[in-house]
Image: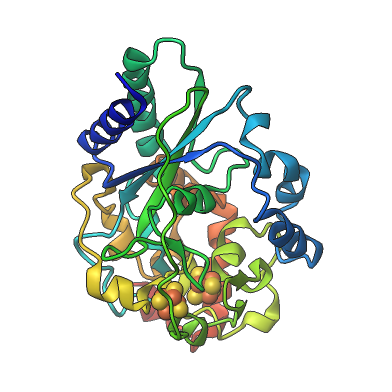
Amino acid sequence: MNLESVSLSIKEYAHSLGFQYCGISQAVFLEQEAPHLEKWLKTHKNAEMAYMEKYFDLRLNPKLLVEGAESVISVLLNYYPKQSQHKDNNAKIAKYAWGKDYHYVIKDKLHLLFDYIKTLLPDVQGRAFVDSAPVMDKVWAKRSGLGWIGKHSNLIVPKAGSFFLIGELIITEKLMYDAPIQDLCGTCTKCINACPTQAILEPYVVDANRCISYLTIELKNEIPDEFQNQMDGWIFGCDVCQDVCPWNIKFSTPTDEPYFTPLPEVSEYQLKDWLLLDEKTFKKIFKQSAISRPKYKGMMRNARFLLKNQKPLSDESFS
Ligand code: SF4
Ligand code: SF4
């Protein structure tokens, strides 16, 4: 098989596993992205995510992650849910976390894809990545022509939107590479204008210190008081900049991935339910959910912070 037919077979197999998109790029040092990442880190836009500084070189060079790396295979999995959280929900959860933790779902599929590649290229070595190592997943997906990185810093797929999770295989064999596509944000600034905390400082620059996703998931300490009344009811993550994006409004279609079927608690739990939840029950319900990332302690902190934004609750609210 030549490079072209091997590459096409890999993409076909990726589709058969449920990935909507698969693109391939050359595993090279990310020269163009290096100064942007350096500036972002030097101006502390990574907030307390020190691991992003620690693995700076690895983040830019796939050959440091996989010896002899030649190709990065990027895959996308649609997570846009069939049903929505109740619109009056006062404890909103980012859509990617409504079903089973995507890390497990994508990694299992990537391992199956890698097994298939081994049948085509028996000497291949490689590793699968899903948010688990310092890999600039959006950049690789962009380089492989799957979309462009929008002003909100998420990957947007033409005529499909941005509600996709990204995974990669970095492998030691050469393949046929895809070409990047152009940025189609144009003069739009909807995401910048809609962000509840003004976290998109300028097009393509998100300050994690201000982003609700960071504040509710990654932040270890208390949420700063300056964000009182700005959380827009988000208890875990935030979808505002993606929800207002015209590419999502027009093109997002529900996923048929069974693992992303929302947990009933995600649609049903209001703030009062979160405040009454005990740790044992939290662990039982969200054991296999991305909502377990900030742990019980983090979710209770988020719930208490949202409560401060509310009018006083009467005893009946808890009945
Ligand atoms: S996720 Fe929310 S807080 Fe973060 S940049 Fe987007 S709209 Fe702003
Ligand atoms: S809302 Fe507009 S500017 Fe923001 S990512 Fe979407 S198209 Fe680009």
In the depicted structure, whether residue 138 falls above or below residue 229: above
Residue located 56% across and 86% down the image: 229
In the depicted structure, whether residue 283 falls above or below residue 153: above
Residue 213 appears anywhere in the view: yes
In the depicted structure, whether residue 23 falls above or below residue 195: above
Q: Quadrant of residue 244?
A: bottom left
* Left or right of residue 31, residue 14 in this image: left
Image colouring: rainbow
Q: Quadrant of the N terminus?
A: top left
Q: Nearer the viewer, residue 273 or 61?
A: 61
* Left or right of residue 67, residue 47 in this image: right
The picture places residue 113, in percent across and down from the top left corner, at 34, 27
Q: Nearer the viewer, residue 75 or 101?
A: 75
Residue located 42% across and 70% down the image: 239
Q: Nearer the viewer, residue 226 or 298?
A: 226
Residue found at the very far right of the displayed protein: 42
Residue 289 appears anywhere in the view: no
* Left or right of residue 214, residue 50 in this image: right
Q: Quadrant of the C terminus?
A: bottom left
